[in-house]
Image: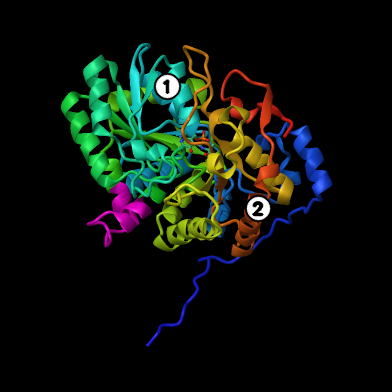
Amino acid sequence: MATRERSWAEPYKIKMVEPLRMTTREERERALVDAGFNTFLLRSQDVYIDLLTDSGTSAMSDRQWAGMMLGDEAYAGSANFYHLEAAVQRAYGYRYVVPTHQGRGAENILSKCMIQPGDYVPGNMYFTTTRAHQELAGATFVDIIIDEAHDPSSPHPFKGDVDMAKLDALVERVGPKRVPYVSVAATVNMAGGQPISMRSLREVASYCRAKGIKVILDATRAVENAWFIKQREAGYERKSIAEILLETCSYTDGCTMSGKKDLLVNIGGFLALNDKDLYDRASNLVVLYEGLHTYGGLAGRDMEAMAIGIHEAIQEDHIRARIGQVEYVGERLAREGIPIVKPIGGHAVFLDARAFLPHIPQTSFPAQALAAELYLDSGIRSMERGIVSAGRDQKTGENHLPKLELVRLTFPRRVYTQAHCDVVVESVAEVFANRERVRGLKMVYEPAVLRFFQARFEPLPL
Ligand code: F0G
């Protein structure tokens, strides 16, 4: 007997709403010109569905809001810090916790503590702020991700995996003393939200331990990574997300964390470490850059919300619905024949702008142009992740030319409904139907660092 299809829905209901403003196409045209065709420079009041990022944009739960009322705003030794510390120790398994205002605060402290000028930091692809802090501290970043990660159509289930031959070649070339740590991200944002397997983490750990090299995890979306391991890696089907997360961290010596993603808060992060000496140095440096080591740039209430968020993030119903929503959009787009990165990522669907707009050369910023066009069509805000984000080579000053030229449709957690998702799919399909009318762009203002945030563009003639 055929089973009837059964729908599933979000494991929460709405208790408070934030009205959205609808705009006309003329209003959006004006807003886009004012923003220099850069979606980062749009005012959020002019945006209908905001898929710029999942960072700090999630909806907190009633329990997190209740926790906000329990802020212990003491300068030193806030009770909320100890809640946060205990929650990190329990869920991530690291010994020492230094709070920071967000992920890049932790990256700055870590890079300053661990990197000497002339060092090399290998990583499974780069993240913009992570690499920028490594470079500011004097290191050269080396990409050691598997080749499949650079191919938007490869169906590899773990595109975040490390290519051990690439890692070994670097260590052989420069010597283990010049490699203070390997930077592993779970999931890999710039590869399209792709996971790293437990097998690869285990391999990296055993290689690095033998050579005396540390492994530092970017744990920003490690809960999402755990979900993919549970779905895709043999032996993990019956393990809980909490168990998989703990095992992930056990292969590393510490992590940097942007709590603004997995942990369901609007602001917050931390650096967690197992080594006492390193912790002592980090908790000393944090005083200089963020705040005392028991608040690190956060209010007590923010630390409380993050501690509660840690607990909520690892609930299976939550993570299934979170990734399920992204999958829903990705599958519908793929069915319309729209080129997206496969497999579908954890936090976002990535449009392949090269395949979407083959008539625009990479130096005319196809992903930037596509993000602008989507905004014009329906007020949806997305983000460029291609040549603009990749920036310039530090030594030669030439543009990096990344293989991936993507537009990211990033989903905040617990914010949008399935009806919003349908509007998004229909808008992308509309732009795809009229794609030959989309024009390339010219960069007319380029900031010195992390240029994608503030660069300005003008359209080229068709
Ligand atoms: N690592 C990863 C993998 C990230 O995605 C981010 C931020 C950071 C570190 C830095 O954390 O923003 O708290 O300082 N990603 C945001 C995004 C900006 O939109 O993907 P932060």
Please give the name of the residue rendered at 48% of the width and 18% of the height, measured from the top-left corner.
393
Query: Would you say residue 289 sits in the magenta stretch?
Result: no
Secondary structure of the residue carrying numbered label 1: helix
Q: Is residue 143 left or right of residue 173?
A: right
Residue indicated by mark 2: 433
Above or below, comparing residue 1 to residue 268 in the picture = below
User: What is the span of residues highlighted in magenta in the rendered image?
Assistant: 226-246
Q: Is residue 183 left or right of residue 35?
A: left
10 Å crowding of disc 1: few (<14), some (14-19), many (20+):
many
Residue indicated by mark 1: 134
Question: Mark 1 belongs to which amino acid?
Answer: Gln
| Residues at marks 1 and 2 touching, judged by CB atoms closer than 8 Å | no
Please give the name of the residue rendered at 48% of the width and 23% of the height, measured from the top-left corner.
132
In the rendered view of the protein, which quadrant contains the N terminus?
Answer: bottom left
Indicate the quadrant where residue 202 lies: top left
Query: Would you say residue 238 sits in the magenta stretch?
Result: yes
Q: Is residue 273 visible?
A: no
Please give the name of the residue rendered at 65% of the width and 37% of the height, measured from the top-left corner.
369
Mark 1 and mark 2: span between their CA atoms? 42 Å
